[in-house]
Amino acid sequence: MKLFMISGRIKDIRTRISATQRSFLNMHISSSDGASYEISISYEHVFDNRPLEVGDSVMAKGQIISHESEDASGEVHLSYEFIADHITRY
């Protein structure tokens, strides 16, 4: 298990329900260095006050559960799947 911490701005928010009927918030986050990440967090860990919105600046901490590399047009692209333990809006 590899831990991570990234910060960036939310580009997209979706919800999904797992096979165990738990709700997750899926977010695409772009960081200041231009990288793009997809992060999932269980609704049990989401803020009680104001929901997250596109454009919010956030910092996410959690674990990498899988990654894969793809070779498209001669370039290698890494794709990571994260499960966030904590997301902080700033």
Image: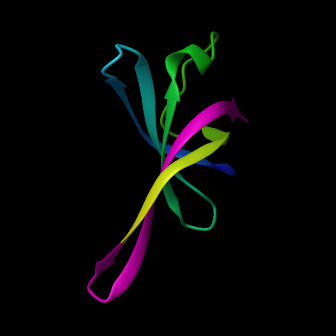
Q: Residue at x 49, y 58 (%)?
A: 36
Q: Residue at x 34, y 23 (%)?
A: 18
Q: Main secondary structure of the magenta part?
A: strand
Which of 46 and 10 lies nearest the eye of the viewer? Answer: 46
Residue 59 % position (x, y): 69, 42
Q: Residue furthest front?
A: 1
Image-quadrant location for residue 13: top left
User: Is residue 2 shown above or below 15?
Assistant: below
Which quarter of the rendered picture does the C terminus lie within? top right
Which of 54 and 62 lies nearest the eye of the viewer? Answer: 62
Residue 1 % position (x, y): 63, 49
Q: Residue furthest top?
A: 48
Which of 26 and 78 lies nearest the eye of the viewer? Answer: 78
Instruction: Inspect this view and state whether residue 10 appears.
Output: yes
* Range covered by the magenta-colored residues: 70-90
Which of 68 and 6 lies nearest the eye of the viewer? Answer: 68
Task: Check residue 76 for magenta coloring.
Answer: yes
User: Is residue 11 shown above or below 35?
Assistant: above
Horizontal side of 79 relative to 64 (left or right) equals left
Q: Residue at x 36, y 85 (%)?
A: 75
Horizontal side of 45 relative to 39 (left or right) equals right
Task: Check residue 84 for magenta coloring.
Answer: yes
User: Is residue 76 shown above or below 58?
Assistant: below
Instruction: Inspect this view and state whether residue 80 appears.
Output: no
